[in-house]
Each structure stands twice: as C-alpha cells, then as structure tokens.
Image: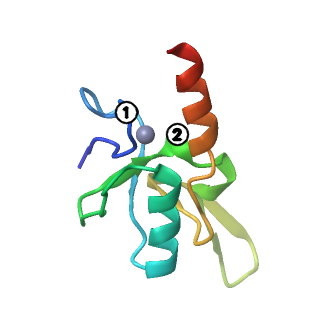
C-alpha cells in the first residue's frame, strides 16, 4: 500500500507512489531513534506511519535477497518490496532538511 511519508516537508508519495516507504520499527529504542531524526513536534508514529527511502542511506535498504543452496551456490533475486536492514536509522534526514532550508 502506498503511503505518504510522515517526515515534515517531504512530499514523497502524496500524489503518486514514487519511492519505497518503510514502517517504524517495532523495537522501542530504534523507533525512538527514528522519531528523533524526523524532528516532528508531538509526533507518535502509528502503525500506518511510514518514512520514505529518501531518508535512509542506500546501504540500509535491501533490494535483493540472497539464498545459499545446499551445493553452495548463491542465488540473488530482486525483492518486490525493498526492506531495511536491522541497523537502519534515518541518517539522511539532516541532509534533506539542510537542502530544504537552502531553498527557502
Ligand atoms: Zn520522505
């Protein structure tokens, strides 16, 4: 389901589904990290809140799955839906904010 990014100032997916978006982690500590990075006042992420791929470093986004077969060969397949690595944080947020402030 396409959902609009909850980061203030980010217009991703408001009209068309153009970038992948990720739900907040269920892990409390990581979820708080995301909320902190987003910097949105009085914001509590709901189960439908998402952050789009623009706020993550590319290496945190998994677009391929690798499976090792019993004979040792590895098959790599492109994922239909990108996922985030377990260590992902919204690190690009500050870059994005800096860019937006320059435009204003
Ligand atoms: Zn966004």
- Whole-angstrom CA distance, mark 1 to mark 2, is 9 Å
Q: Residue 12: which disc?
A: 1
- Percent x, y of residue 32: 46, 70
Q: Residue furthest top?
A: 103
Residue name at image x 28 percent, y 41 percent: 4
Q: Is 104 left or right of 58, judged from the image as shown? A: left
Residue name at image x 59 percent, y 66 percent: 85
The answer to whether residue 38 is above or below residue 35 is above
Of residue 56 and residue 10, the one placed in the foreground of this image is 10
Number of numbered markers: 2
Determine whether the beta carbon of the residue marked 2 sits less than 8 angstroms from the nearest atom of ligand 1: yes
Of residue 80 and residue 26, the one placed in the foreground of this image is 26
The answer to whether residue 10 is above or below residue 53 is above
- Percent x, y of residue 10: 40, 33
Say if mark 1 contacts mark 2, CB within 8 Å.
yes
Q: Quadrant of residue 17?
A: top left
Q: Earlier in the sequence, mark 1 or mark 2?
A: 1
- Percent x, y of residue 38: 46, 51
Kindly state the secondary structure of the residue where label 2 is placed.
helix
Q: How is the image coloured?
A: rainbow
Q: Is 4 left or right of 94, judged from the image as shown? A: left
Q: Is 76 left or right of 53, judged from the image as shown? A: right
Kindly state the secondary structure of the residue where label 1 is placed.
loop
The answer to whether residue 25 is above or below residue 64 is below
Determine whether the beta carbon of the residue marked 1 sits less than 8 angstroms from the nearest atom of ligand 1: yes
Which residue does the numbered mark 2 point to in the structure image? Answer: 54
Of residue 99 and residue 4, the one placed in the foreground of this image is 99
Of residue 81 and residue 75, the one placed in the foreground of this image is 81
Residue name at image x 54 percent, y 44 percent: 55
């Amino acid at each position: 389901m396409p959902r609009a990014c909850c980061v203030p100032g980010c217009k991703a997916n408001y009209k068309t589904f153009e970038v992948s978006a990720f739900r907040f982690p269920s892990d409390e500590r990581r979820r708080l990290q995301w909320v902190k990075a987003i910097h949105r006042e009085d914001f509590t992420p709901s189960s439908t809140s998402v952050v789009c791929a623009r706020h993550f470093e590319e290496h945190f986004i998994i677009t391929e799955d690798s499976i090792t077969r019993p004979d040792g060969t590895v098959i790599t397949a492109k994922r239909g839906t990108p996922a985030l690595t377990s260590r992902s944080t919204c690190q690009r947020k500050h870059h994005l904010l800096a860019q937006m402030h320059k435009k204003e």
